[in-house]
Amino acid sequence: MALREQGRAGFDTPSTPTSSTGERVYPPKPVSEMRKKGIYPSVVSLPRDLSNLASELGAFPFDADTSRFTVRYFVENGALNSLSPEERSNVEQYIEGIVKLEGDGEAFQDCSVIYMGKNSQSRRTTSELFKTEIATELRVFSSKSPEKKYDYSDFTFREISSHDKVDPKIIDQYEELYKAFGWNRDQVTQILQNPTSILIGAFEGDRLVSSGMAERAEFDIERNGVPHKFVMYEITEAATNIDYRGRGIYSKIARNLLKALANTDTDLVYGECNAQSPAVLQASHSLGRTSSIQALAEFGFPPKLLEQHVRIAAGPNDLRPITEKNDLLPTYMTRNKLLQYANEN
Ligand SMILES: CC(C)(COP(=O)(O)OP(=O)(O)OC[C@H]1O[C@@H](n2cnc3c(N)ncnc32)[C@H](O)[C@@H]1OP(=O)(O)O)[C@@H](O)C(=O)NCCC(=O)NCCS
């Protein structure tokens, strides 16, 4: 997810890209919210190469328009498991998340996607907030909450059709709902009209009360000189009208999205969850997505988050300074698990 840039003059200027998945581009290039973002184009198979890439990230310069770098790398698990102590500590200072691709059914089964990032001094999360967010994540992802029963009789759930996407009444309602992400009307229209995204909305009568979206990205990653296709969908832009929260509406949207995604050729479904939202973490856990913190632990890394990645407004009572952003937790499901989920539900 991405929202408006905080202009240097102190007011919001619209960011051009509304895409959240990011592009396969390296070195990282400017995106919204004073970030440079990228995906490294080939599989990293040697621990030394990963450490060198960490050093390269460390050397990228901040400037007046860039206070964060965020890059994803496809890395062989063997390389992650055989880092020397020096290489490990070099990587550890930048690593922010791991998504294991085991079960993607394709060329990267023995690889993981590593998030590395760095922020300028003015864009840091306090250690108190970080500890609270990690404690919430550990509590949510270790819980075994029984499936809850909700009454959905007042609502209809449906995929947003191509007709809906150009209907001014629907666009108006999305504009209202997506205020949490800072999107303006043009950006909302652009999001709705992305032909490869799947959107599901919940309606009370004609009123849109909640929505979730799966945004597709497809690119090649080179391995031993051969390009391999990789398809991923990011579950993003989760928003429920504040008066309708806590009624299981988003959970049902997320379930329906997973079922729709099982009919695609995706290798990976993931989300970057607002670490301050127990509801989004809980929904992601209940749906069987794995937390990146678990994957980090499997490779011997401490808990980490995508630090101050984007701002997600918590509603009218969100009194944080406008420059303060949210830490995000990647959670994910590879293809085999997705198909199993769709079979069982
Ligand atoms: C996140 C958000 C979309 C959730 O919408 P919602 O319709 O209220 O969600 P649900 O009622 O379906 O709840 C989702 C899960 O969280 C649980 N939950 C809800 N509120 C909770 C709370 N305050 N604390 C802990 N768990 C909570 C529910 O029990 C449900 O669990 P289940 O899947 O096991 O049944 C909504 O809070 C929102 O719009 N937040 C602002 C924008 C935002 O942060 N988006 C997320 C971006 S990553």
Image: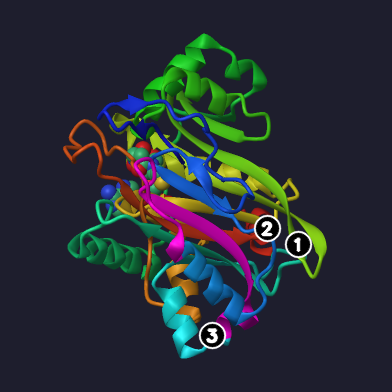
**In this rendering, would 270 be left or right of 219?**
left
Instruction: Give the distance between the C-alpha atoms of the residues marked 2 and 1, in whole angstroms.
Output: 6 Å
Q: Identify residue type, mark 2.
A: Pro
Residue 317's spot in the image, x, y percent?
Answer: 18, 35
Instruction: Give the distance between the C-alpha atoms of the residues marked 2 and 3, in whole angstroms.
Output: 21 Å
Residue 222 badge:
1
Structure colour scheme: rainbow
Q: Which residue is mark 2?
A: 41
SS at mark 2 in the image: loop
Residue 299 badge:
none
Say which quarter of the image contains residue 83.
bottom right
Q: Identify the residue at horizontal 30%, vertical 66% (top origin).
A: 134
Residue 83 badge:
3
Q: Earlier in the sequence, mark 2 or mark 1?
A: 2
Q: Earlier in the sequence, mark 3 or mark 1?
A: 3
Nearer to us in this view, 47 or 296: 47
Can residue 223 be found in the magenta stretch? no
Q: CB of mark 2 within 8 Å of CB of mark 1?
A: yes
Q: Identify residue type, mark 3.
A: Leu
Q: Identify the residue at horizontal 38%, vertical 67% (top origin).
A: 304
Nearer to us in this view, 293 or 111: 111
- Is 318 drawn above or below residue 251 in the view shown? above
Q: Identify the residue at horizontal 58%, vertical 80% (top origin).
A: 48
Q: Earlier in the sequence, mark 2 or mark 3?
A: 2
Nearer to us in this view, 230 or 264: 230
